[in-house]
Image (cartoon, rainbow, N blue to C red):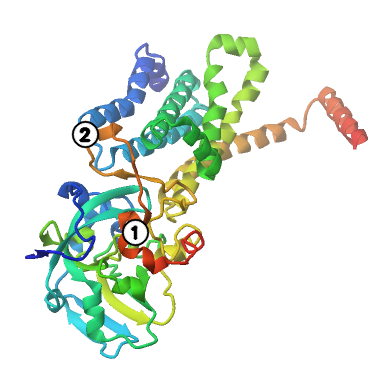
C-alpha cells in the first residue's frame, strides 16, 4: 500500500524525470569540464548508447513489474521512460553524426548503408520515432487504442535490433560480457510477455459455448482458405 | 632511461607528443581487461623483474636474455612515432629502445627464416583477464622477416624518457609504427624465428577483420568502420576537434612502401 501511495505522490513523476535526466547532466558536465578521459567523443557516443539500452530495458520492465508486483500505478511512468529512451537515442545518433562524422551527411548516409551494425542501430532509431511521436494522449485517441497498441508493439522489434546493434559492435572483439547482461534482461522481459500471452490463450480455451462456436467458425474459414 | 635521439630515417616525427597521462591511461592490453581504463588500473600486478626473453627457432644461436642484458644489447634511442590504433584513434609517442634488427642479427637467422613470431606473457596470476574468452592466450603476433628487420621496427623498453609503464607493455615490447597498434606485441617473453606465417591473436579471433599484415591503410576499411580518418587523442579543440586524415602506412610510406611493392594490399590487409 505504501509503495502504491508513493507512486501516486505528486512529486513522484517530477522525481523520475529528474533522475532520468541525471546521466545527461553528468555527461554534459563532464564534457564541459574535460572529464571524459582521453577520447571524449568515443565516451559520449558509447555512453549515450548505453543509456538508450538502459532506458529501453526500464521501459519494457514497467508492465511486468506492474503485474508481478501488483502495482498498477507503475503504469504512470511508462510513457516518460519510453520518451527518455528516445531522448538518449537521439543524443546517441547526434553524437555519432557530430563527433564521428562531423555532420557530413553524404558520408553518414554511406556509412549507415555500408555497415550492418550501424544500419541495424539506425533502423531501431527510425522505428522508435513514430512511437515517440504518438506518445501523447491525442495521438492515442486519433489512432484508436487497437491501432496504437499494434504500432507500439514495434518496441519488441526495436529491442531486438538494439541488442543486435550492440552485439555486432562488440563481436569483432569477442567481448560479449556486457552484451550478455542486456540480452539476459531483455530475454526475461520479453519472455515474460510470451509466457503471459500463452497463459492467457490457455485460460481462454475452456471458453463459453458462444465463443467456441466463433472459434470453430474462424478455424473453418481458415481451413477453407487453405 | 638514457637515450640518444635516433638517426634512423623517419624515426622522429615533429608532431606534438600525446600527453603522458593519456598515453598511460587509455590502453588496449586485454590481459588486464577490455576497457581502455582497465590496464592502468590492473597492470600494477605485473612483475617485470626477473624477466627473460627467449629467442629461438630458425637461428644459429638461440638464446635466453635476462631483461637487464637485453636492455644493454644496443644503444638506446629515442624515437617519436605516430601510433594508429585499428579502432580509429591515434597518438604520438616518444619511445625508447633500439631496432629489433640488432637482436635478430645477434642470434643469426638461418637461410630459411621467413617470419618472426612474438609471444606475450600469459600469466593468470598477475594478468586477471588471461583466461577470458576474448582471445586465445597467450597473445601472439608476427612479422615477415623483412618487416622485422626494418630499422623502424623497435624493440621498446621505455617511453617519455622513462621505463615502460606496465600498462604500456613493460618490460619490453615491439613497436611497428606503420601497422595498427595491435601488431606491436607487449610484455614479450619469446621471439621465435620461423619459416611459416605465424598465427596471430587477433587474426585467430576475427580473420575477416584483422589480417596478418594490418598495415595502416586509409583505403581499406575495417568491416565495421572506415579507416580513412582518425581521432588524434588530446588534440586541441577538445570535443569538437575534427578527425584527421589517416596516411598510407601511417605516414611511413617513404620508409616502408617498398616492402609491399606489387602486393595487393586489399587482399593482404
Q: Is residue B66 above or below residue B165?
A: below
Judged left or right of residue A88, residue A122 is right
Image coordinates for residue B146, horizontal then vertical, percent: 35, 74
User: Distance of mark 2 from mark 1, alpha carbons?
Assistant: 35 Å
The residue at the point 38 percent across, 37 percent down is: A100
Q: Secondary structure at mark 1?
A: helix
Q: Secondary structure at mark 2?
A: loop
Residue B149 falls in which quadrant of the image? bottom left
Image coordinates for residue A67, horizontal then vertical, percent: 53, 28
The residue at the point 29 percent across, 67 percent down is: B124
Q: Nearer the viewer, residue A59 or A211?
A: A59
What's the chain of the residue with tag 1? B
The image's mark for residue A34 is 2
The image's mark for residue B217 is none
Number of numbered discs on residues: 2
Using the rendered image of the protein, determine whether residue A68 is visible from the camera's viewpoint. Answer: no
Crowd band around label 1 with a 10 angstrom C-alpha radius: few (<14), some (14–19), many (20+):
some
Judged left or right of residue B84, residue A71 is right
Image coordinates for residue A70, horizontal then vertical, percent: 50, 26
Q: Find disc 1 in the rendering and name its residue.
A: B253
Q: Is residue B88 above or below residue B211?
A: above
Using the rendered image of the protein, determine whether residue B76 is visible from the camera's viewpoint. Answer: yes
Q: Nearer the viewer, residue B252 or B53?
A: B252
Q: Nearer the viewer, mark 2 or mark 1?
A: 1
Crowd band around label 2 with a 10 angstrom C-alpha radius: few (<14), some (14–19), many (20+):
few
Residue A191 falls in which quadrant of the image? top right
Q: Nearer the viewer, residue A42 or A152?
A: A42
Image coordinates for residue B54, horizontal then vertical, percent: 25, 81
Q: State the quadrant of the N terminus of chain A.
A: top left
Amino acid at each position: 500500500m505504501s509503495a502504491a501511495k508513493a507512486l501516486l505522490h505528486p512529486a513522484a513523476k517530477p522525481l523520475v524525470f529528474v533522475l532520468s535526466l541525471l546521466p545527461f547532466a553528468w555527461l554534459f558536465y563532464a564534457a564541459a569540464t574535460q572529464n571524459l578521459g582521453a577520447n571524449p567523443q568515443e565516451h559520449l557516443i558509447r555512453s549515450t548508447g548505453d543509456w538508450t539500452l538502459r532506458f529501453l530495458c526500464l521501459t519494457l520492465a514497467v508492465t511486468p513489474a506492474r503485474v508481478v508486483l501488483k502495482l498498477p500505478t507503475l503504469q504512470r511512468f511508462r510513457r516518460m521512460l519510453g520518451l527518455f529512451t528516445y531522448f538518449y537515442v537521439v543524443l546517441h545518433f547526434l553524437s555519432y553524426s557530430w563527433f564521428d562524422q562531423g555532420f557530413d551527411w553524404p558520408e553518414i548516409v554511406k556509412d549507415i548503408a555500408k555497415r550492418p551494425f550501424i544500419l541495424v542501430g539506425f533502423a531501431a532509431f527510425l522505428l522508435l520515432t513514430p512511437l515517440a511521436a504518438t506518445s501523447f494522449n491525442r495521438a492515442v485517441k486519433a489512432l484508436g487504442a487497437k491501432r496504437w497498441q499494434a504500432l507500439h508493439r514495434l518496441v519488441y522489434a526495436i529491442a531486438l535490433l538494439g541488442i543486435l546493434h550492440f552485439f555486432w559492435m562488440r563481436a569483432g572483439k569477442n567481448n560479449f560480457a556486457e552484451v550478455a547482461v542486456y540480452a539476459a534482461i531483455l530475454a526475461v522481459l520479453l519472455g515474460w510477455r510470451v509466457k503471459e500471452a500463452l497463459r492467457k490463450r490457455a485460460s481462454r480455451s475452456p471458453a463459453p459455448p458462444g465463443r467456441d462456436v466463433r472459434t470453430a467458425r474462424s478455424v473453418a474459414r481458415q481451413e477453407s482458405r487453405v | 632511461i638514457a637515450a640518444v635521439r635516433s638517426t634512423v630515417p623517419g624515426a622522429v616525427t615533429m608532431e606534438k607528443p600525446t600527453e603522458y597521462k593519456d598515453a598511460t591511461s587509455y590502453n588496449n592490453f586485454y590481459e588486464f581487461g577490455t576497457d581502455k581504463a582497465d590496464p592502468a588500473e590492473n597492470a600494477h600486478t605485473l612483475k617485470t623483474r626477473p624477466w627473460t626473453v627467449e629467442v629461438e627457432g630458425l637461428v644459429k644461436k638461440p638464446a635466453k636474455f635476462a631483461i637487464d642484458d637485453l636492455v644493454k644489447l644496443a644503444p638506446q634511442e629515442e624515437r617519436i612515432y605516430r601510433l594508429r590504433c585499428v579502432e580509429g584513434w591515434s597518438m604520438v609517442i616518444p619511445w625508447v629502445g633500439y631496432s629489433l634488427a640488432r637482436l635478430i642479427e645477434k642470434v643469426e637467422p638461418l637461410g630459411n627464416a621467413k617470419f618472426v613470431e612474438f609471444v606475450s606473457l600469459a600469466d593468470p596470476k598477475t594478468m586477471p583477464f588471461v583466461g577470458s574468452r576474448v582471445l586465445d592466450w597467450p597473445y601472439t603476433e608476427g612479422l615477415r622477416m623483412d618487416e622485422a628487420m626494418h630499422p623502424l621496427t623497435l624493440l621498446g623498453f621505455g617511453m617519455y624518457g622513462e621505463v615502460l609503464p606496465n600498462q604500456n607493455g613493460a618490460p619490453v615490447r615491439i613497436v611497428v609504427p606503420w601497422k595498427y597498434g595491435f601488431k606491436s606485441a607487449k610484455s614479450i617473453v619469446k621471439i621465435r624465428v620461423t619459416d611459416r606465417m605465424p598465427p596471430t591473436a587477433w587474426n585467430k579471433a576475427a580473420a575477416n577483420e584483422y589480417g596478418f599484415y594490418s598495415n595502416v591503410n586509409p583505403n581499406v576499411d575495417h568491416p565495421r568502420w572506415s579507416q580513412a580518418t582518425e581521432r588524434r587523442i588530446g588534440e586541441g579543440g577538445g570535443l569538437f576537434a575534427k578527425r584527421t586524415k589517416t596516411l598510407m602506412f601511417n605516414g611511413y610510406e617513404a620508409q616502408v612502401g617498398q616492402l609491399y611493392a606489387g602486393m595487393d594490399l586489399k587482399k593482404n590487409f
